[in-house]
Amino acid sequence: MANILHLMPDLEPDEMDFVQSLVQDMPEAEARQFASIYRARRKEPQLVLITTLLGFVLLAGLQRFILGQIGMGLLYLFTGGLCLVGTIIDLVNYKRLAYEYNVKEAQQVIRMMRY
C-alpha cells in the first residue's frame, strides 16, 4: 500500500486525499510511477493565481488556456475576461480551478497506466 504523503508531500490536503484514494491499492513501484507522471502534469494553484492576476493587465483568459479550457480562454480573451467579472470570479476560485484540473489529470494518468 503506497502512501502518497511520502511520494508527493507538496499536495494540498483535498488533492492529497483524492490521489491517496487512487493509489491506495497500488504496489509501491506503480505508485512511484504514477507520482512521477502526475507531478509533471499537474498545475500548482499558485500558477493559476498568477495567471489570473495577469489577466487584469495583460491577457484575459490566460489561466483558462493553461488549464486546457481553450473555449473559455477565447471567450475571456475576446470579452476582456467577461468585462473582468469572470476574471474576478476566477481569482476567488483559483484553488478550485486548479483542483478540478488536477483531478482530471490524475484520472487520465490512472487510465493511461492501466492500458
Image (cartoon, grey):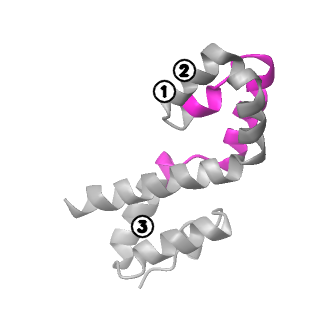
Of circles 3 and 1, the one toward us is 1
Give the residue at x 70% y 18%.
Answer: 80
| Mark 1 closeness class: few <14, some 14–19, many ≥20 residues within 10 Å | few
Q: Earlier in the sequence, mark 3 or mark 1?
A: 3
- Relative to the observer, which residue lies in front, 66 or 56? 56
Label 3, secondary structure: give it.
helix
Q: Which residue is mark 2?
A: 74
| Label 1 to label 2: alpha-carbon separation | 5 Å
Which image quarter holds the C terminus? bottom left
Residue 89 position (above or below residue 107)? above
Mark number for residue 71? Answer: 1
Give the residue at the far bottom of this rendering. 1
Which quadrant of the view contains residue 14? bottom right
| Mark 3 closeness class: few <14, some 14–19, many ≥20 residues within 10 Å | some
| Label 3 to label 2: alpha-carbon separation | 37 Å
Which quadrant of the view contains residue 6? bottom right
Q: Are marks 1 and 2 in contact (CB under 8 Å)?
A: yes
Three-letter residue code for mark 2: Leu
Of circles 3 and 2, the one toward us is 2
Q: Please provide the residue range marked out in magenta.
A: 39-65
Three-letter residue code for mark 1: Gly
| Residue 11 position in % (x across, y down) | 63, 63
Q: Main secondary structure of the magenta part?
A: helix
Give the residue at the far left of this rendering. 115
Mark number for residue 32? Answer: 3
Three-letter residue code for mark 3: Arg
Which quadrant of the view contains residue 17? bottom right
Give the residue at x 57% y 65%.
Answer: 8
- Relative to the observer, which residue lies in front, 38 or 15? 15
